[in-house]
Image (spheres, rainbow, N blue to C red):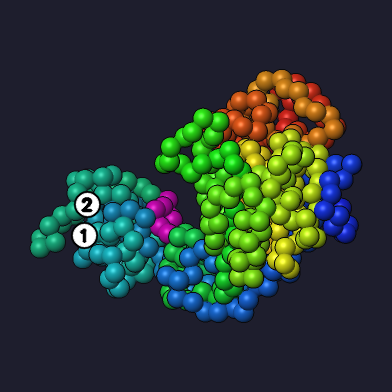
Amino acid sequence: MQSSLPPPSRGRGRATRERSTVPRSVSAHQEAVRSLLQAPLSAAGPAAELPLARARGLVLARDVTAPVSLPPFANSQMDGFAVRSADLAAGRPLPVAEPVPAGADPGPLRPGWAAPVMTGAKMPAGADAVVPVERADPPRFPDASAAAEVLLPQTAPGTYVREPGSDIAAGARALPAGTVLGPAQLGLLAALGLTTAPVRDAPAPRVLLVATGDEVVAPGTALPEGKIFDANGTILHAALAEAGVEVVDGGLVPDDPGVLRQLIREYAPSVDLVLTTGGVSMGAYEVVRQAMADQPVDFLSVAMQPGGPQGIGTVDGTAFLGFPGNPVSALVSFEMFLRPALSELRGLPQPRPVVRARLAERTDSPPNKHQVRRGVYAEGTVRLVGGPGSHLVSALAASNALVHIPEGRGAVEAGEDVTAWLL
């Protein structure tokens, strides 16, 4: 879990299917979600050696040790002349030896000579420095077919020389277990001569995603009076996919408990989690609450703004989470509760970088709630975007950070430090 929040309380009470009169703390609900998902997601799967091309996005099952040094030999950092630095002290021109192209295995450099050397080429034995060609007199490589001399300035030993193992030494840990393999990490393994990686070969979690509500219609269709386009499906589908989840799209379901119940029961046996949006509050037509009436699902309030109403439990034995229906509430709920659990239980790194930032302007927060505001972070300062409302999708889209004002903090003055998660 992100370190900015208070430590989670352990354990989770028995599901009651009714909203508790006392709001649950954010940390307690984080632990409840983690506990709910531990069984379906904690199986790491056997370690498997997969080709690098198939290992992208997977997690290293064990440490990888460098079998060779990088670079494996001393090489030139510049196009220039490989020299013995002591030969430059007299200030006399040096005869030019055979050039050393990249990939060649040159012989030793004779004392008092200079060898044209290309970037990345192996340094001749005896040479301890490189003088860039533009600093030579004349400032060019001579014709290889003719005898030539070059005048070079005094240069310290080691100048423009990449020493063996200066990147990583043979036997050192190249990547630790738990590393997510992206292009840079796979590139390192390839540079070390490896063709496979030991990864956790567990399938991606499968999540059934269902948006609910008579008031929403699919984007791209006609918009009748009193209706809005559904953003939750797109927001959460993208967030789940970004977290490495296989999304089973249940589409939009109207406020009909029977339809929702049938859809969930059809898919529940084949997924690890059922996730719904909307229908979890105290209104008269809370379809998710109605559909879960015979299931061990808790509908409760978390002391958080936005995202207070939450549902958690199981449906037909499958883990179930119900997020509120406002788009900002849905995404904040995902970032606060589901993404951290997915990352932790799958052995992935902390999902969002955490920074301390100066607040650009004063803001008020309910003292009995953990408020999550949207903001723009830059150069140590965070500026709030939009208000606390859970419907402000444009403000969400303009943000690059979630700003946390913990329960009990109340007003925060301009210039005070706050915790922000970078998106």
Looking at the image, which is closer to me, 124 or 296?
A: 296
* Side (left or right) of 212 relative to 406: left
Whether residue 300 can be seen here: yes
Residue 378 visible in the current orientation: no
Up the image or down, 377 lies above or below 29; here it is: above
Looking at the rendered structure, the secondary structure element under dot 2 is strand
Q: Residue 381 carries which label?
A: none
Residue indicated by mark 2: 150
The spot of residue 55 in percent (x, y) is: 49, 70
Query: Mark 1: few, some, or many residues within 10 Å (few <14, many ≥20)?
Result: many
Q: In which quarter of the image is the C terminus?
A: top right
Please report the bounds of the magenta region as a residue range: 156-162
Question: Looking at the image, is 16 positioned above or below residue 21?
Answer: below
Three-letter code, disc 1: Val
Q: In which quarter of the image is residue 187?
A: bottom left
Q: Do the residues labelled 2 and 1 touch (CB within 8 Å)?
A: yes
Describe the element under mark 1 as helix, strand or loop: loop
Q: Mark 1 points at which residue?
A: 96
Residue found 55% across the figure and 79% down from its top: 48
- Comes first in the chain, label 2 or label 1: 1
Left or right of 406? Residue 271 is left
Q: Residue furthest left?
A: 145
Nearer to us in this view, 269 or 196: 269
